[in-house]
Amino acid sequence: MKNLKRFGALALALMLALSALTGCGQKGPGSSSSTGSSSGSGSGSEDLSQTAPMDLSEVTDPYLAAAGISGDTVVARLGGEDIFAAELLYWLNRNTKTYLDQFGGMVDTPPWTAELDTGVTVADQMKEGAMDAALFYRSLYQLGKGENLTPDASAASTVDKEYTDLMLQMGDESVVQHMYWAQMLSRELLVYLNECFDLYSQLQQLYYGEDSESYPTDAEVMSWLDQGGYFRVKHILLMTIDQVTNDPLDEAVIAEKKATAEDLLAQLRAAEDPISLFDQLMKEYSEDGGLATNPDGYIFNAEDSLVGGFREATLELSVGEISDVVETDYGFHIMLRLPIDPADYRSSVIGQGMEERCRQWQEEKGVEKTAAYDQIDPAAFWTKLTSLQSTVQAEIQAASSKNG
């Protein structure tokens, strides 16, 4: 499981996300996107106005309504301790949202039956990822107890205050309750998630704090970066393909771009301060669409898919060295390899250490999935959940209009 800090940060962000739900609205004619939670944990970035609403008047268990099993159904056990459907379905919702967010609102349903490179379907991958997250949080809780750590007592009171503030804002407690349901949340689950995240922070300090024996040194961080194939680079790119169609440009235009690239390289080779000149020329000439958001360069690792020749040419450079003109399928590049500050990645090394400790804990205690886990159908769940969310969105809009 990757991005453990993301998992943890989400728990604390949920209370803000609940408030952000009050800004949800239907898309008007010609809109390209719908509004929602800034943290991605709202009632859905898809256009819920096109989804048939669910009658919530007799719903008492949102998990039963969305997945066909009650929230207190045991779906797995870690060391004999129960993991409930509510936990799994919360993460299944989040995983699905995260998957869809990468398409910028253009897709509202994953290709559930499509097979990934690993041979498993998207649906199975989503569900396994949700179980991984649920197990990770339960591991944190058990590890914390084993170390005699106590979660911050303010977790429950903070959730209660947020709930009360939302009631005052919405003017209707049922709407607030349904806002929780839209995220596959209950008060108890939200408190538990925040307690787990607090334990994560305490365990991280205990195991990897500056005073601990396992605090990663700069040398250890750099070794980790080397093993992961990390490198940092800036480049000047003169494109030889059409940025819309990806078709090759006219041969005369390509020849002109090559001549320009060679002239830029000559200027850099003759400069007294080639690094400063590189930035100047990059801003003036580079046609890299990501330059505006990555002015300080890119950081890649071994898992990143890069155009052929780019990685190889960069890794041949020493830090601070400028390449010759390198041609790829995108165009002509001039690369500048940059240093990586280990301080920027120490938390990643610690995060991996925490992940390994939790994985080891799970191996030692044993994980057992129940028959109820197999009964959960991610595709059917998502259809029902979006229907529930459509109702909640309408309720939020009505309450917001009523309260001005």
Image (cartoon, grey):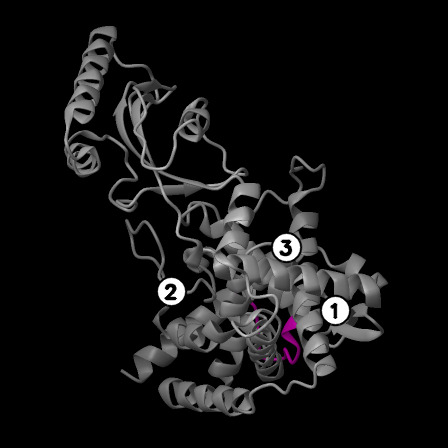
Report if residue 11 lies within the magenta region: no
Q: Secondary structure at mark 1?
A: loop
Packing grade of label 1 (10 A; few <14, some 14-19, many >=20) is: many
* Residue 56 drawn in magenta: yes
Query: Which of labels 2 and 1 is toward the front?
Result: 2
Label 3 vs label 1: CA separation? 26 Å
Q: Quadrant of the C terminus?
A: bottom left
Q: Nearer the viewer, residue 44 or 147?
A: 147
The kind of secondary structure the magenta stretch mainly shows is loop
Point out residue 103 in the picture as x, y percentages from the top left corner.
44, 45
Is residue 45 toward the left or the right of residue 271 in the image?
Answer: right
Kindly report which numbered mark, 3 or 2, lies closer to the viewer in this rendering: 3
Q: Residue at x 56, y 87 (%)?
A: 152
First along the sequence among labels 2 and 1? 2
Span highlighted in magenta in the image: 53-63
Q: Amino acid at mark 1?
A: Ile
The answer to whether marks 2 and 1 mark residues whose Cβ atoms lie closer than 8 Å is: no
Q: Which residue is mark 1?
A: 69
Q: Looking at the rendering, which quadrant does residue 197 occupy?
A: bottom right
Front tag of 3 and 1: 3
Return the mark for residue 1. Answer: 3
Mark 3 nearby-residue class (10 Å; few <14, some 14–19, many ≥20)? few
Mark 2: which amino acid?
Answer: Ser
Q: Nearer the viewer, residue 304 or 15?
A: 304
Asked where in the image residue 20 lies, by quadrant, the reply is: bottom left
| 386 relative to 167, above or below | above
Res. 322 image quadrant:
top left
